[in-house]
Amino acid sequence: MLKLTNPNITIAVSGLKTGDNPQPGVPVIRSIRAAGFKGKVIGLVYDAMESGIYLEGIADEVYQMPYPSTGAESFIARLDYILSKSKIDVIIPTLDSEIPLYIRLEKELLERGIHTYLPTEEQFNLRDKIKLSQFFPPKGIDIPKTHLLQSADQIVKLLDEISFPVIIKGRLYEAYKAYTVAEAQKYFYELQAKWGLPIIMQEIIEGDEFNVVIVGDGKGGCLGMVPQRKLVITDKGKGFGGVVVKNPGLESYARKVIEALSWRGPCELEIMKDAEGVFYLIEINPRFPAWVRLAEGSGQNQPAATVLLALGEKDVELPPFKPGTLFIRHAEDIMSDISLLGEISVNGELIRHEVKQ
């Protein structure tokens, strides 16, 4: 079993929201602590209401960060303030919107002693939702029929090429199933207002839905891979229950995707298998998914491995995963004191002097 035995390092993790649309930070931290880590964990948050802030045994210290859209200068300034109070050896960002900033600032982070294990900017851009249909089909990787919409009027013009229902996606987040042109146009305007253009319209592949969490080595190989089939899906399409599956065809397909990108670091592949057994790549999420503890539970502690890889370890080995491992997400109320909310809201930070293990 992979172990993190150095208590003198400090690990920072972002994205501590839990709930019906959880962020990956809390399960990433739990996996790191499950590897025996006794050092300091810092939570980086964007909102004082991120519920993981108030969970005991998660983050020793919490700091509010400026939104990535404010730019590199404010990000570095805030980071330097945090470093004046506490060193950081490794950061694992878990939100799509912040990863480009971490990639571009790799040199500045290293100058401050902070290590990451992330893809290059080119790799990150190639997996963008608006580029999937251009990059992968020439490499023999099937993608659902996809159209990039610059105006809602295009939906009517494409009726001969795609049949309803369809999926309407924002370029960064959110996806909705539309059964009519009017419904598709409604979602177009909603997503345009939130995420800008283009909006993605994609055919729906009927069949079995799989997700695969992977740590790529940056050379086309996979240091770890755990596939799951969703068993419980929310109305937002989020998996609230799943089981690890052994499917050689799925694993081969996933390796082909990672090889095409030479992906470095964590990612999640969303894959559909149709009635004829053909696999389709739906999305590549450039970070750990919220269900990443299923990887740990099946024998592959990928967050712990990522810490070691970020620190330059060369001989990091993850064991084969155990098929049949099941997860079911459990929601519960968190009890805390209003003073903690005040501390993070007013001061932008929360320091715990003791974290229960």
Image: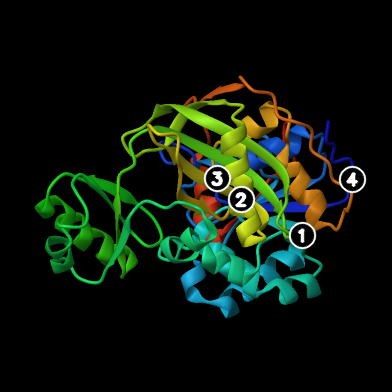
Q: Nearer the viewer, residue 79 or 72?
A: 72
Quadrant holding the C terminus: top right
Q: Nearer the viewer, mark 3 or mark 1?
A: 1
State which quadrant residue 207 falls in.
Answer: top left
Q: CA distance from mark 1 to mark 2?
A: 35 Å
The number of discs equals 4
- x 34%, y 65%: residue: 195
At label 4, the amino acid type is: Asn
Q: Earlier in the sequence, mark 3 or mark 1?
A: 1
Disc 2, SS: helix
Residue under pointer 1:
88
Disc 1, SS: loop
Q: CA distance from mark 4 to mark 3?
A: 29 Å
Q: Earlier in the sequence, mark 1 or mark 2?
A: 1
Q: Which mark is residue 282?
A: none
Q: Nearer the viewer, mark 4 or mark 2?
A: 2
**Image: 62 above or below 245:** below
